[in-house]
Image: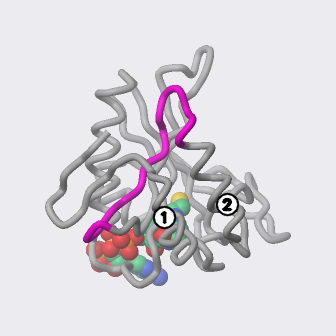
Amino acid sequence: MLLDLGDLRVRPWRKDDLDALLRYANNPKIASNLRDQFPHPYTRRDASDYLSFVRAMDVPTSFAVEHEREAVGGIGFRLGTDIARLSAEMGYWLGEPFWGRGWMTRAVQAASEWALDDYKLTRVFAMVFSHNVGSVRVLEKAGFEREGIMRRSAIKNGVVLDQVLYAKVR
Ligand SMILES: CC(C)(COP(=O)(O)OP(=O)(O)OC[C@H]1O[C@@H](n2cnc3c(N)ncnc32)[C@H](O)[C@@H]1OP(=O)(O)O)[C@@H](O)C(=O)NCCC(=O)NCCS
């Protein structure tokens, strides 16, 4: 996958992304909005294991968001199985120095359209902690529709949270 969005690209992770991944992913403000699978602190070992894992996937589903040849964030899909095989869940993050420039809105918009086409899906969805106003805005601006609130559906850092469900369907 390679989406050329001008000053941004969405492309496969590379081995030499390790330093950039470590630089931007090791941030509690990012980890606290993602699954526990995305650790904090984010160590060099975590970064190296992640890059090995995603680079070995048969069907690539995790991509770097690149700016000026540097990986500054990530966007990925979890493909559904069985009766949910036409759906995928999307997740994303961006390095804090780049927040508020509209970048993730553009990346999410383009990557979700790409995923619907390329994986031949009927649905891409995302679940956001209800307090994550920035991410909710990203999804709304990227053409996702709010489907409802999944009350008390997650526990993060010991706190039970509501998640908002957003989807784009075709
Ligand atoms: C969420 C995240 C991806 C947003 O990326 P971004 O490139 O800064 O997003 P954009 O600039 O495209 O859009 C952010 C929007 O949210 C708004 N926003 C951001 N923080 C906000 C806040 N605390 N309150 C209200 N609005 C907020 C911005 O104003 C902007 O909306 P606008 O264009 O209408 O002004 C980034 O902050 C991030 O990586 N956060 C940590 C990880 C995460 O939350 N991932 C998503 C998990 S579901």
Disc 1 residue type (three-letter): Trp
60 or 146, nearer to the observer: 60
Which residue appears farthest toward the left when viewing the image? Answer: 6
Q: Is residue 161 visible?
A: yes
Question: What is the secondary structure assignment of the residue under circle 2?
Answer: loop
Task: Give the residue pinned by disc 2.
Answer: 38
Task: Give the residue pinned by disc 1.
Answer: 93
Question: What is the secondary structure assignment of the residue under circle 1?
Answer: strand
Specify start and end residues of the magenta stretch as a single range.
55-69
Q: Are marks 2 and 1 in contact (CB under 8 Å)?
A: yes
Disc 2 residue type (three-letter): Phe
Q: Quadrant of the C terminus?
A: top left
Specify whether tag 1 is near ligand 1 (CB below 8 Å).
yes
Above or below residue 110? Residue 159 is: below
> x, y percentage for residue 132?
54, 70
Of labels 2 and 1, earlier in sequence is 2
Which residue appears farthest toward the front when viewing the image? Answer: 16
> x, y percentage for residue 162?
67, 60
Q: Residue at x 64, y 70 (%)?
A: 31
Q: Is residue 133 visible?
A: no
Q: Residue at x 29, y 37 (%)?
A: 114
> x, y percentage for residue 3?
24, 47
Q: Is residue 117 left or right of residue 159?
A: left
Disc 2 to disc 1, C-alpha distance? 10 Å
Q: Quadrant of ligand 1?
A: bottom left
Within the magenta stretch, is there residue 117?
no
> x, y percentage for residue 119?
39, 25
Q: Is residue 80 left or right of residue 17?
A: right
Q: Residues within 10 Å of mark 1 (few under 14, many from 20)?
A: many
